[in-house]
Image (tube, rainbow, N blue to C red):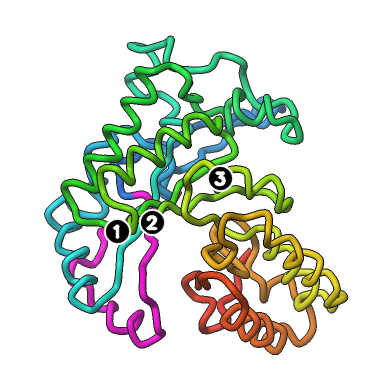
Amino acid sequence: RVQRKTFNPHFNHLDYLKDLGATAIWITPIVDNRDEPFWVDDGQGRKFAIWGYHGYWAKDLYKVDEHLGDIHKFKELVQAAHAKDMKVILDIVMNHLDYDHELVKSKQNWFHKHGGIADHNNQWWTEYGDLSGLPDLDQENPEVAQYLIDASKWWLEHTGIDGFRLDTVKHVGRPFWKKFNQSMHEAAGSDFLLLGEIYDGRPEFCAAYLHEGMDSAFDFPLYYAIKETFGHEGSMRRLGEILSQDSLYPDAHLLSTFIDNHDVPRFISESGENGRQKLQLAMAFLMTIRGIPVLYYGTEVGLLGA
């Protein structure tokens, strides 16, 4: 069982981030999240609990989770960051809601009804199947699309944030993203950052979503190449192969480059012998190559983690 603690409300560590050179902070989803465990059957008659501490199981898109504070405290964080010339990017989810969100019963036609994703290599299943069994929203339904757009606009209008990190992009159809991106930029201006998580190693696949008006995306193709080259002593040619496809993107300099994040094992944990030295090489590359470098918390001190 996970013990949950109240977030420190005093923002004591903004100076630490500022001293690292951070110009923006991307934080976990802050919307009201599932409190109870979700029980999963292991197929052998035993059940175990999964806790939604991560924020990706939303139960109220207009409320701050009580473990993090309230809307006033979040506004204070944004103001404090802005006072130090740092922007705040909020993580939001357009693909799904919590397992037993009230809309699952009251708006049954708002969700796909195909069951879990049967083939993750099939784009139809990726978009229309339930990710981890979560209720999969049907963004082709105009009511659903408007519901998600209105909720997102509410956050940018009421909090002064500077961008959204868009979760599970490839699990939602591109027509919705085109409408969403246009709506957000109309509401907030062209300098409001829309950063997509397109969890795929193919540049041509990732680039297609950026042509729908998204400003940036996590550079997963380059991530895999960095991991192979610096982490596993692979050929530098692999980096060249990925960078040679930069012309596929509207502007490759706006891609968000990284070497680890919350969805993958930490770089240093998979690098084997001389992992710290490999991490330093990878970081030097990350900070000097094209793109916007994204530093995952703890990487700056070589934190281990699977």
Sequence-wise, the earlier of marks 2 and 3 is 2
In the picture of the structure, the residue carrying the numbered disc 2 is 193
- The crowd level at tag 3 (other Cα within 10 Å; few <14, some 14-19, many 20+) is some
> Which residue corresponds to the image point at 18% horizontal and 52% vertical from the top-left?
159
Q: Nearer the viewer, residue 255 or 127?
A: 255
Q: Nearer the viewer, residue 75 or 242?
A: 242
Whether residue 207 appears in magenta in the rendering, the answer is no
In the picture of the structure, the residue carrying the numbered disc 3 is 211
Q: Amino acid at mark 2?
A: Leu
- The crowd level at tag 2 (other Cα within 10 Å; few <14, some 14-19, many 20+) is many
> Which residue corresponds to the image point at 16% horizontal and 66% vertical from the top-left?
79
**How many angstroms separate mark 2 from mark 3 (CA)?**
15 Å
Where on the picture, by quarter, is residue 205?
top right
Whether residue 18 appears in magenta in the rendering, the answer is yes
Where on the picture, by quarter, is residue 103?
top left
Q: Amino acid at mark 3?
A: His
Q: Nearer the viewer, residue 85 or 199?
A: 85
- What numbered label is drawn on residue 162? 1
296 with respect to 259 (left or right): left
Bounds of the magenta segment? 1-29
297 with respect to 266 (left or right): left
Secondary element type, mark 2: strand
Which quadrant of the rendered structure holds the C terminus?
bottom right
